[in-house]
């Protein structure tokens, strides 16, 4: 009668690291920080842990947490604080953050030789800032329901409707709404204030440092 209770207690008291996936433990071993340990109010929904992304495949088979390099992670916390000060009803919601190069290769294999290849960094050329934990794919959501705000396109839309330098034209043509444009602008404002730089072709993508600086000072995530 006591054995099942003993087994239950044994698992309950396992150290937190033992409960994390192999990929999560690898991320931490490489010095990355799991975002919600710094700010539990930041919401996470990794799009590559599901098949409803532009690749149509699950790329993260054992990861549901968002990791970043410590300096980028601390900056993201500041962006969340700025957002919550302006709009207590909203929260940042992460769809992708640090990305191992092995996952980058899987992503590249899907788009290689297609028109979508311009949106994905080729691992042979050193990958991109996601592969250093210095980039994040992010949106705005309702703090209570977690529902994402209207941003004009799906977060993983690869095409001109997601370009931030065409938003005024897109509104005039009725392709995205005025509110979607305002939501994008709010996201960019709080992210820029925290030190992030938006990507012209993807309203959801923000870099914390340049690719040149990353290659000179930091290590690729494996």
Image (spheres, grey):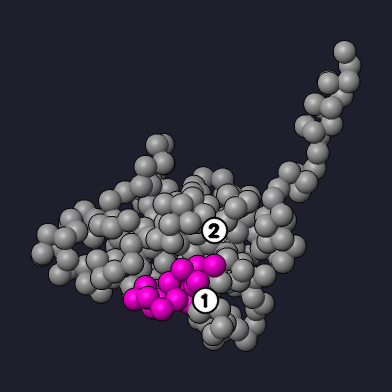
Can you tell which quarter of the image residue 120 is in? bottom left
Circles 2 and 1: CB atoms closer than 8 Å = no
Residue 92, visible in the rendered structure: no
User: Is 74 in the magenta?
Assistant: no
Q: Secondary structure at mark 1?
A: loop
Say whether residue 30 is left or right of residue 161: right
Residue in view at x 71 percent, y 54 percent: 22
Residue found farthest to the top: 1
Which secondary structure, mark 2?
loop
Q: Earlier in the sequence, mark 2 or mark 1?
A: 2
Q: Position of residue 14 (x, y in %)?
A: 81, 38
Q: Which mark is residue 42?
A: none
Q: Please tell me which residue is depicted at 57% across the width and 66% down the height of the picture.
A: 103
What residue is shown with label 2? Answer: 59
Tag on residue 128?
Answer: 1
The location of residue 75, given as percent across then percent down, is: 53, 64
Residue at the front extreme, as displayed = 113
Kindly indicate the quadrant of the structure image that contains residue 124: bottom right
Start-end of magenta stretch: 106-121
Residue 59's x, y, as percent? 54, 58
Question: Is 81 rendered above or below residue 162?
Answer: above
Question: Which residue corresponds to the image point at 73% horizontal and 44% vertical from the top-left?
Answer: 19
Main secondary structure type of the part rendered in magenta: helix
* Quadrant (top left, top right, bottom left, bottom right) of the C terminus: bottom right
Query: What separation in Å lies between label 2 and label 1 (alpha carbons)?
Result: 17 Å
Residue 50 appearing in the image: yes
Name the residue rendered at 83%, 20% in the picture: 5
Task: Say left or right for 200 vs 121.
Answer: left
**Viewer-nearest residue: 187 or 48:** 48
**Which is more foreground, mark 2 or mark 1?**
2
Quadrant (top left/top right/bottom left/bottom right) for the N terminus: top right
């Amino acid at each position: 009668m006591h054995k099942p209770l003993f087994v239950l207690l044994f698992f309950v008291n396992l150290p937190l690291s033992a409960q994390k996936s192999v990929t999560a433990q690898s991320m931490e071993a490489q010095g990355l920080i799991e975002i919600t340990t710094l700010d539990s109010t930041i919401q996470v929904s990794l799009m590559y842990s599901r098949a409803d992304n532009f690749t149509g495949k699950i790329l993260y088979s054992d990861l549901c947490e968002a990791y970043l390099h410590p300096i980028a992670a601390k900056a993201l916390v500041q962006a969340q604080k700025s957002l919550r000060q302006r709009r207590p009803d909203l929260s940042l919601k992460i769809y992708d953050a640090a990305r191992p190069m092995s996952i980058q290769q899987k992503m590249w294999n899907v788009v290689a030789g297609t028109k979508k290849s311009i949106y994905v960094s080729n691992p042979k050329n050193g990958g991109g800032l996601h592969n250093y934990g210095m980039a994040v794919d992010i949106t705005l959501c309702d703090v209570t329901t977690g529902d994402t705000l209207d941003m004009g396109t799906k977060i993983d839309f690869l095409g001109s409707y997601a370009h931030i330098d065409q938003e005024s034209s897109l509104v005039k043509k009725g392709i995205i709404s005025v509110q979607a444009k305002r939501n994008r602008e709010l996201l960019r404002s709080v992210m820029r204030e925290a030190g992030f730089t938006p990507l012209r072709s993807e309203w959801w993508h923000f870099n914390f440092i340049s690719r040149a600086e990353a290659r000179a000072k930091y290590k690729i995530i494996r």
